[in-house]
Image: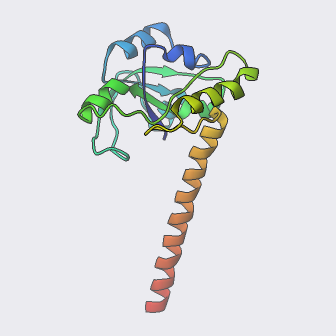
Amino acid sequence: FANFAVDTDDFEKIYDEFRVPPDQLAAWKKEPSAALVGHKLAETYGWKLNDRVTLKGTFYSVDPEFTIRGIYTASEDSAERDFYFHWDYLNEALNRPNQVGAFAVKANSAADVPRLMDSVDRLFRNTDAETKTETEKAFTLNFVSMLGNVKFLLNAISAVVVSTILLVA
């Protein structure tokens, strides 16, 4: 499942389509090791408020432990399958490399999106951290396409294993 280290200060302004009970949102923001999870994700794993969850490191060599302090719902089911936690908590666990993988920016209107995307890319052009600005839908599709490549890889490995077994037999 997708998990994101985020700046909790303005989270609800960017993800205003998420519905989080105010007491849960406040608890999540207050505690550095707290997690905010989607309703569908919590349902899939049987998680409840105050459950402890450890994420096994994939991109990073740390296995951070979290306490679920909030469960949100959203207008789209796919958005309810994400796991959010404090960026500061991950940054500290990684000995403060202060690197960011993605920014979420909210436009005032759909008409502003192309200009905003161009402005962000222009701001980071010719730097060590050039950006590729895309819509949230394109970002999600890129994530899904990565999962598709993993499935292809696993199927290819399985085919080689079966072929090898047949040859040996």
Residue drawn at 74 percent across, 22 percent down:
110
Pinpoint residue 65: horizontal percent, then vertical percent.
29, 32
Residue furthest out toward the left: 95
Locate residue 94 relative to residue 45 in the image: left or right: left
168 to 103, vertically: above or below: below
Q: Quadrant of the C terminus?
A: bottom left
Q: Quadrant of residue 74?
A: top right
Residue drawn at 71 percent across, 21 percent down:
112
Looking at this view, is 139 or 152 the one in front?
Answer: 139
Residue drawn at 26 percent across, 29 percent down:
92
8 to 137, vertically: above or below: above
Tally the marks: 0
- Whether residue 169 appears in this view of the structure is no
Pinpoint residue 151: horizontal percent, then vertical percent.
55, 59
Residue furthest out toward the front: 126
Locate residue 140 relative to residue 124 in the image: left or right: right
Locate residue 75 relative to residue 22 in the image: left or right: right
Locate residue 146 relative to residue 49 in the image: left or right: right
Looking at this view, is 46 or 41 the one in front?
Answer: 41
- Whether residue 150 appears in this view of the structure is yes
Residue drawn at 49 percent across, 33 percent down:
102
Pinpoint residue 19: horizontal percent, then vertical percent.
57, 16
Q: How is the image coloured?
A: rainbow
Pinpoint residue 11: horizontal percent, then vertical percent.
49, 17
142 to 65, vertically: above or below: below
Residue furthest out toward the right: 111
Q: Quadrant of residue 5?
A: top left
Looking at this view, is 117 or 146 the one in front?
Answer: 117
